[in-house]
């Protein structure tokens, strides 16, 4: 069984294996296919039309499936690798270990946001940005430049306390747990972290920054925590809702996956107890 660990507890060897597996997926073209998929859904998911990956109830099961597929790709390279999660309620600034040169590298330089250290820096020669929002082919970050503070544990707990998964109008205006976690309402959890990192993470091509997977692994962990706290609060909507993915509807781009299939993460992986 795959165990997803807090990135802060990874050994040097685990960090190296994770990075090397990502670099191999980049080299063989698999990685950019994930970026293309995510960007396509960001661009097509709208409040007033069909929405699958974002601004909708299926935000959480869609990303759970997306992360699982990526983790399986990593494990095809190195079976020992699992997706780590980034607990941004604890590792809250640019000095945190995940931004060290031996892991993800740090923030970008002031004049253009270019990441200058670590394995994903342009100078390392293995991380060209091919799926772009503009002409720049290098990884960019601006940690803490656009929003000063990452979400706190108290803010997370306030969202985990919400008892209803989602509700009409089933988009970015909805109340309920999903939309408050996604960040369109309330204290803004998931979206705020994307903006805090900046660079590609603040765009539809956010998986260009490998921290995307660690951020979403933590979002997935928070969903699992919410499910445990509220065992009688089901995924909503159940059926018959236009433009969104009901419990037993198929989620694009997969032709055999529904939200119901994604409710029990323990079939595929567990989280550490840290």
Image: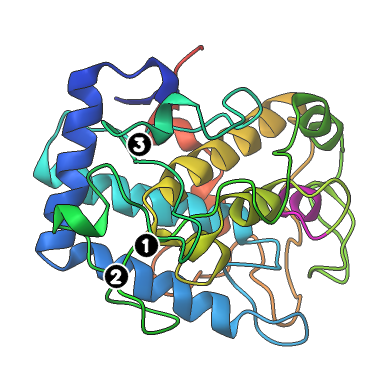
Q: Residue 53 is drawn in which quadrant?
A: bottom right
Instruction: Tell me the element at label 2.
Output: loop
Tag 3 secondary structure: loop
* Direction from residue 230 to residue 221 in the image, left or right: left
Relative placement, left or right, of 233 versus 17 is right
Residue 256, x across and y down, in percent: 39, 66
Looking at the picture, the colour scheme in use is rainbow
Question: Of callouts 3 and 2, which one flags the residue occurring earlier in the amino acid sequence?
Answer: 3
Q: Which mark is residue 208?
A: 1
Q: Is residue 49 above or below residue 158?
A: below
Q: Cα distance, mark 3 to mark 2?
A: 21 Å
Dominant secondary structure, magenta: helix
Counting residues from the start of the chain, the first of labels 3 and 1 encountered is 3
Quarter where residue 44 is shown: bottom right
14 is within the stretch colored magenta: no
In the picture of the structure, the residue carrying the numbered disc 2 is: 129
Residue drawn at (55%, 40%) of the image = 220
Can see residue 255?
no
Q: Residues within 10 Å of mark 2 (few under 14, many from 20)?
A: many
Q: Earlier in the sequence, mark 2 or mark 1?
A: 2
As measured in the structure, the alpha-carbon distance from the residue carrying label 3 to the one carrying label 1 is 16 Å
Residue 158 visible here: yes
Observer-nearest residue: 106 or 170? Answer: 106
What residue is disc 3 on? 83
Return the residue found at the far front: 111
Callout 3 touching callout 1 (CB < 8 Å): no
Classify residue 25 as left or right of residue 219.
Answer: left
- Magenta segment range? 178-184
Q: Is residue 100 above or below residue 72?
A: above
Marks 3, 2: nearer the viewer: 2
Circles 2 and 1: CB distance less than 8 Å? yes
Position above or below: 214 against 27: above
């Amino acid at each position: 069984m795959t165990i997803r660990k807090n990135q802060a507890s990874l050994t040097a060897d685990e960090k190296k294996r994770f990075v090397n597996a990502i670099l191999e997926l980049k080299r063989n073209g698999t990685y950019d296919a994930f970026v293309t998929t995510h960007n396509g859904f960001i661009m097509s998911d709208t409040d007033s039309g069909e929405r699958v990956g974002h601004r909708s109830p299926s935000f959480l099961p869609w990303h759970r499936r997306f992360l699982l597929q990526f983790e399986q790709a990593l494990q095809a390279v190195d079976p020992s690798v699992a997706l780590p999660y980034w607990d941004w309620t604890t590792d809250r600034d640019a000095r945190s270990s995940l931004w060290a040169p031996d892991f993800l590298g740090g923030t970008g330089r002031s004049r253009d946001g270019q990441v200058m250290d670590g394995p994903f820096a342009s100078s390392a020669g293995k991380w060209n940005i091919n799926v772009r929002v503009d002409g720049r082919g290098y990884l960019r970050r601006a940690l803490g430049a656009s929003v000063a503070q990452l979400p706190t544990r108290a803010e997370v707990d306030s969202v985990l306390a919400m008892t209803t998964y989602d509700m009409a109008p089933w988009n970015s205006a909805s109340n309920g747990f999903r939309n408050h976690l996604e960040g369109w309402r309330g204290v803004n959890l998931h979206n705020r972290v994307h903006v805090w990192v900046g660079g590609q993470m603040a765009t539809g091509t956010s998986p260009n920054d490998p921290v995307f997977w660690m951020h979403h692994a933590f979002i997935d962990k928070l969903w699992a925590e919410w499910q445990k706290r509220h065992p009688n609060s089901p995924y909503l909507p159940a059926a018959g809702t236009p433009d969104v993915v009901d419990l037993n509807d198929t989620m694009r781009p997969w032709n055999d996956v529904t939200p119901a299939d994604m409710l029990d993460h323990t079939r595929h992986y567990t989280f550490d107890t840290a």
